[in-house]
Amino acid sequence: MYRLHFTPDAASLAVRLALEELGQPYEARLIDRAGGELQSESYRALHPLGLIPVLETPDGPMFETAAILLYLADRHGGIAPAPADPDRAQFLKWLFFIAHNIHPTLLQLFYPDRTAGPDCAARVLDHAAARMRAFLTIFDRMMAEERPSWFAPDRPSMMAYYLGLLMRWLAAPGPSHDFRFPPADYPAIRAVLLAHEARPAALRAAEAEDLGPTIFTDPA
């Protein structure tokens, strides 16, 4: 059985969504974030940076959201193209596009002072907002033109759960800015997220973390 170390509405939600979609038994262990558990020796043994999520697996503890999702997809199948699938190359390049462009830029929007210090926060925010609009537009255009089977309304996709989590956070102003990136501005992405948030797996995950039924397109 897997053990997912989580806090509500954190990156661990994408992993919970994948586990629910795959029907895999797992233990969800709530992290005592306020009590300093992320800095504890025991947690740092699982994740050296003390970040979320961590998934304990039969092959040892894993961290990094995209890596965990890809591991689950390859181990159990059904939510991403298999290694020998002709669609695998396209899937991988867009997965890493999200992991190396959209996700880090989101973190700059939420924590601009971490990038260049508080004195440069406003410039970091402006730069990150422009980059985020460009990244989402590129992905949405790809979706509309190519209609890939691995990111579609009619079949479960680990990438949809990953991007859906990020779009959830981008739909509302962050703690340090007024920028918003509502899914309605990206119709091809939104169509997939609407379908995925209505799946039983997503509804179970949303109920477990008390997030409301429209977790991607209209966050509670």
Image: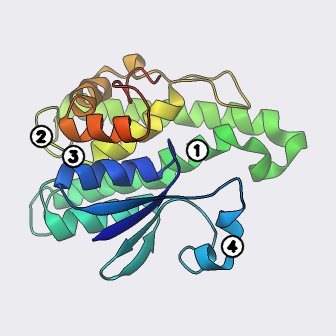
Q: Is residue 218 left or right of residue 45?
A: left
Count residues near mark 3 (Cα–Cα under 10 Å), then give few for <14, some for 14-19, many for 20+.
Answer: many
Tell me which label, 3 or 4, sits earlier in the chain: 4
Residue 37 is situated, as x and y percent measured from the top left of the image, at: 66, 65
Q: Secondary structure at mark 4?
A: loop
Asked whether 92 or 22 is in front, the reply is 22
Residue picked out by circle 3: 157
| Nearest the eye: 104 or 16 | 16
Residue furthest top as drawn: 184
Is 166 situated above or below 189? Answer: below
Q: Earlier in the sequence, mark 1 or mark 3?
A: 1
The three-letter amino acid code for the residue at tag 2 is Arg
CB atoms at circles 3 and 2 under 8 Å apart? yes
Viewer-closest of 80 and 214 = 214
**What residue is shown with label 4?**
40
Q: Nearer the viewer, mark 1 or mark 2?
A: 2
Under circle 2, the secondary element is: loop
- The numbered mark at residue 105 is 1
